[in-house]
Image (cartoon, helix red, strand yellow):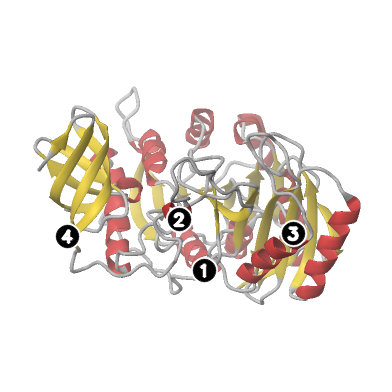
Amino acid sequence: MGRKKQNIVLENVRIEAIAAEGKALAHIDNAVLFVPFAVPGDIVDIRVTKKRKNYMEGLVLRMVEPSPDRIDAFCEHFGVCGGCKWQPLPYEMQLAGKQQQVYDQLVRIGHLDIPEISSIIPSDKTTYYRNKLEFTFSDKKWISQEEMPVEEGAEIPSCPGVGFHVGRFFDKVLDIKKCWLQPEPSNEIRNFIRQFALENGYSFFNIRKQEGWLRNMFVRNNQQGDIMLIICFHYEDAEARKTLLDAVSERFPEIKSLYYVINGKLNDSISDLDCILYKGDDAIYEQMENLRFKIGPKSFYQTNTEQAYKLYSVTREYANLSGSETVYDLYTGTGTIAQFVSSKAAKVIGIEYVPEAIEDAKINAAANHIDHCEFFAGDMKDVLTEKFIQQHGRPDVIILDPPRAGIHPDVAKVILDAAPERMVYVSCNPASQARDLAIFCNEDESGRARYKITAVQPVDMFPHTHHVENVVALEKI
């Protein structure tokens, strides 16, 4: 083990286990060392990037001896692109790591009393499983060490690119040649647009200077192979826009829905902007059992369609509906879970922040001939009030599927006051889920616990990442 002043290097470190946030860990003296892109069993030299009293963070400088479990990464962009960091980890080990993550967050850290966690449900597809990707245009793509000029003082080349943001850098974009997350023609569309833009002299966006024309693009697909494409421009240039959109439409007849957005804001979000239909249908559709769901440019839909069916099936099972219950589906998105459980409920109320998603939910319900689902748009803590519950009926079952941050304390209070017989909490973040579950399951000021956890089911929605979806069933005590 060697150390350099102001540049600590740890030699021959044996990686011991998988840690949180997709990192691996080792122990150095009395400190824990966290390292990305490492596999348990690797022996590596580490450059320390952060040192605190009880832990350190570092990067692999040199692979001394690879783990016998390590496999080759299949993507040429691995290690620079911020996604799919677990590619060198066999899928079985990925699943074990996610199972452990759920246990650690709920039991070891959250101190919750839970039954045995069910074995994680794997994804049948470990590549090409996503139905939505966002790519960013940049007038200065990320330059690798190999692309750097050799001569000292030489100017670093400036080349446009389109792809994903690099790590923690908001202004660094890696030019992606092939992404393994979404089936074709996703790569073909992106590469065609890049080439067409370069040939026609279209400018790419510079986020620091807020200059340039091409800004973002979204590719959505369904299981039938239909494509929705949304291209975001920094400002309107009608002639160039028409030329580009016509060229894309002619080249890719699979694009059933072609939109564009003019975004002159400082951020890339399109939730508050008009999505203008240029050509084709206003939506694509996804089928799940006997239900058909409309997916618009702003709609939320689980990004792994096949795993979404498994996730919703677990949710419906845990809701344990007999047909007489009033169900509240909070954070309903486009109403997928609400409609998925509706055949076994007397009434379903769905609430969601995004108005466009609620409009899609209403359209979906009508198209699916479901007349006992009602949907409401607004901030959850403002919509879900005691007055709302009095108007629409007290819930027998509440289903929660909130954003990563979890639920607002005001929402938790209203839920406790509503006192449903059962709850099903679906989460993409077991840490915030554990925090919220503690509100429902820990003893209150009177020494009484309101709910007990009866089942826990992790589901892998995102292979080759550390992310895991988790479903928890609760019953009133």
Q: Earlier in the sequence, mark 4 or mark 3?
A: 4
Q: Earlier in the sequence, mark 2 or mark 1?
A: 2
Which of pointers 3 and 1 indicates the residue nearer the eye?
3
- Image coordinates of residue 333 in percent, x first then y, are 63, 51
Badge 1 element: loop
Image quarter where the C terminus lies is: top left
Crowding around mark 2 (Cα neighbors within 10 Å: few <14, some 14 to 19, many 20+) is: some
353 relative to 252 in the view: left or right? left
**Residue drawn at the location 27% of the way across and 61% of the way down:** 96
Residue 111 shows in the view? no
346 relative to 196 in the view: left or right? left
> What amino acid does circle 1 point to?
Tyr
Please name the residue that numbered disc 4 is placed on.
41
Please name the residue that numbered disc 3 is placed on.
197
184 relative to 96 in the view: left or right? right
Please name the residue that numbered disc 1 is placed on.
129
- Image coordinates of residue 180 in percent, x first then y, are 50, 68
> What amino acid does circle 3 point to?
Ala
Badge 4 element: loop
- Cβ–Cβ below 8 Å for labels 4 and 1? no
Q: Earlier in the sequence, mark 3 or mark 1?
A: 1
Q: Quadrant of residue 80?
A: bottom left
Find the distance from the CA under tag 3 to the CA under tag 1: 28 Å
- Image coordinates of residue 305 in percent, x first then y, are 56, 67
Residue nearest the observer in this picture, 417 or 30: 30
Badge 2 element: loop
Residue nearest the observer in this picture, 150 or 22: 150
Q: Earlier in the sequence, mark 3 or mark 2?
A: 2
> What amino acid does circle 4 point to?
Gly
Crowding around mark 3 (Cα neighbors within 10 Å: few <14, some 14 to 19, many 20+) is: some
